Image (spheres, rainbow, N blue to C red):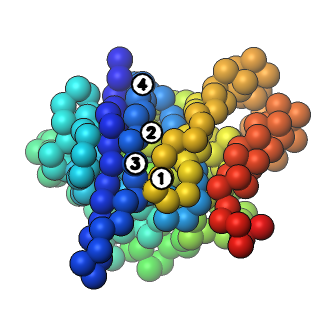
Amino acid sequence: MSAIVFDGVSRVFTRDGKDFLTLDGIDLTIREQEFVAIVGPSGCGKTTCMRMVAGLEFPSTGTVKVGGVAVKAPGPERAVVFQQFALFPWKSVWENIDFGLKCKGIAAAERGEHIRRFIELMSLQGYESAFPHQLSGGMQQRVAIARAYAVDPAVLLMDEPFGALDAQTRTVMQEELVRLARKNPRTVLFITHAVEEAVYLADRVVVMTRRPGRIKEIVDVGSVRRAENWDRHDRVEEVMDQESFVHLRTRIWRLLREQQAPNEH
């Protein structure tokens, strides 16, 4: 079944009395439990796509549907993880993860089971009482991901969630997300500037043109992953060493290179 559908979506912003076409004619279908990454030049509308699925922005023309229903507002079936960790600074790790569960009206005993499960999945044991300022950036993002997963969303929206992390922590978080996605598959729309990250994580990579953003090509990574059995490797660098990975990465880089403005070459 289709989890997310963009049907003829365009988006116009108005600034200083002038209209700017940011997205133009986006048609995209994302299947249930499929992991799709969007890459493209800065300003091409990647984040705008995600925000429209989240119900935080809306198309100027066309429709965005989740589960066959047009998106009119944010909803509990969609959870968002932003680049900035967006945790409640006055709440502990446990309380941050508990927040969405409380909002759903889940009983305390059941909430505790959920929280313990995701604390374990995200390797947060021993930090239950810690506050965000006491955690590293990577640990804070673990909490944000645990909070998003804990409310059992059908759709997980991730806007450059590892962009603010150092390279080593980012690699660890990519491995954690792959591990979590295998145990708890969700429909994921993942926005990133990093081509290697997109190829490592996604089933399909959507390559956007520069503004106005259009879909230039959709690259099928999942079939290569299965054929080459990337899952036998536990670490990012082991997958990135594979010839098939290098081929896909190079292909997407070339597609993006074509989208550079003439004075950027």
Q: Amino acid at mark 3?
A: Asp
The residues bearing labels 3 and 1 have C-alpha atoms spaced at a distance of: 6 Å
User: Do the numbered discs 4 and 3 sit on residues whose CB atoms are within 8 Å?
Assistant: no
User: Do the numbered discs 3 and 1 sit on residues whose CB atoms are within 8 Å?
Assistant: yes
The residues bearing labels 2 and 3 have C-alpha atoms spaced at a distance of: 22 Å
4 or 2: tag closer to the N-terminus: 4
Viewer-nearest residue: 80 or 18: 18
Viewer-nearest residue: 61 or 225: 61
The residue to which callout 2 is attached is 188
Q: Report crowding for label 1: few under 14, some 14 to 19, many 20 or more residues within 10 A (C-alpha).
A: many
Q: Residue at x 39, y 25 (%)?
A: 32
Q: Quadrant of residue 111?
A: top left
User: Do the numbered discs 4 and 1 sit on residues whose CB atoms are within 8 Å?
Assistant: no
Q: Report crowding for label 2: few under 14, some 14 to 19, many 20 or more residues within 10 A (C-alpha).
A: many
Q: Which mark is residue 24?
A: 3
Q: Quadrant of residue 9?
A: top left
Q: Residue at x 50, y 73 (%)?
A: 135
Q: Position of residue 41 (x, y in %)?
A: 59, 60
- Please give left or right for residue 264 compared with residue 215 in the image: right
The residues bearing labels 4 and 3 have C-alpha atoms spaced at a distance of: 22 Å
97 to 118, vertically: above or below: below
The residue to which callout 1 is attached is 213
Q: Amino acid at mark 4?
A: Arg
Q: Which mark is residue 263?
A: none
The mark lying in front, picked from 1 and 2, is 1
The reply to whether residue 143 is visible in this rendering is no
- Please give left or right for residue 185 compared with residue 177 in the image: left
